Amino acid sequence: MLAGVSDSSRSPRSPSVVARITTSRLLLREYRAAEFESFAREFADPLSRTHMPGLVDRRTAWRVFAASMGTWMLNGAGWWAVELLATGELVGTVGAFFRETALDGKLPVDLELGWIVFRPFWRRGIATEAAAAARTFGFERLDAPRVIAHISPGNVASIRVAERLGMRHEVDVDFYGEERVSRYAVERP
Ligand SMILES: CC(C)(COP(=O)(O)OP(=O)(O)OC[C@H]1O[C@@H](n2cnc3c(N)ncnc32)[C@H](O)[C@@H]1OP(=O)(O)O)[C@@H](O)C(=O)NCCC(=O)NCCS
């Protein structure tokens, strides 16, 4: 069972406010407007974006930032800011979200996970801990039969995170005509 959740989310995929989840070291919570600069910096960092589709300018970063919160109101899923409980520092972001492809009725409506840890906090197990909470939220609160992640084949660290979550390589897919990415997936236990 997922411990430490307090939210007003209701039935699966219904509108909700951002769920709050605590793990042993982390608090997953809503984004705050004052934190936008940290996100914009991250989206424009060439090293962090090595395996992501390009650098994101500040204007687009704002849209991504706002949409990451907005989808909570649309379908009860989205992204969280990840805060280190011990210090209150913002250390990254994880998501459990539906793409727009889930709305056209033609494609599978898989819940997707995503993870970004800010560079000074890499290799401390933060992505694994935060993403595991997002995965469990997907299974237990959103009733997802399985969760997926799209990862660039060269993103060794991210593949490791997926594997730590029990995800296995499923298929390589064309990602919006931009690149080939690997889809990882794990079924609900
Ligand atoms: C991918 C990312 C989120 C990993 O975050 P993290 O908090 O450093 O990951 P963790 O500490 O939980 O490490 C998970 C595993 O990856 C390994 N790992 C982490 N960074 C690594 C690196 N640069 N090279 C190789 N392995 C790495 C860890 O050793 C660990 O493996 P283990 O379980 O075998 O010990 C982080 O590197 C990042 O934000 N990158 C930029 C954004 C990105 O690419 N996001 C994913 C998009 S799909």
Image (cartoon, grey):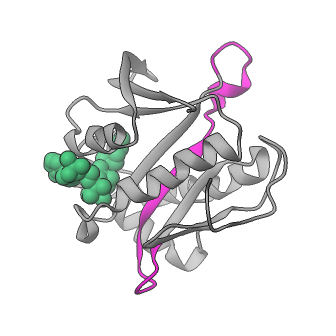
Front residue of 168/177: it is 168
User: Residue at horizontal 41%, vertical 50%?
Assistant: 115
- Name the spot of residue 172 as percent of width and height, x first: 35, 17
Furthest toward the bottom, the residue is 87
Front residue of 140/39: it is 140
User: Residue at horizontal 45%, vertical 27%?
Assistant: 185
User: Residue at horizontal 62%, vertical 59%?
Assistant: 66
Residue 97 belongs to the span the image colors magenta: yes
Front residue of 43/173: it is 173
User: Residue at horizontal 56%, vertical 60%?
Assistant: 80
Q: Is residue 139 above or below residue 183?
A: below
Residue 84 belongs to the span the image colors magenta: yes
- Name the spot of residue 91 as percent of width and height, x first: 38, 70
Residue 126 location, quadrant: bottom left
Q: Is residue 97 above or below residue 29?
A: above
Whether residue 148 is visible, yes or no, is yes
Front residue of 24/157: it is 24
- Name the spot of residue 51 as percent of width and height, x first: 26, 41
Q: Is residue 107 above or below residue 14?
A: above
Residue 45 location, quadrant: bottom left
Residue 50 location, quadrant: top left
> Which region is colored magenta?
83-108
Whether residue 45 is visible, yes or no, is no
Furthest toward the top, the residue is 106
Question: Image quadrant for the C terminus?
Answer: top right
- Apparent side of residue 45 relative to residue 132 in the rendered image (left or right): left
Q: How many marks?
A: 0
- Name the spot of residue 90 as percent of width and height, x first: 43, 75
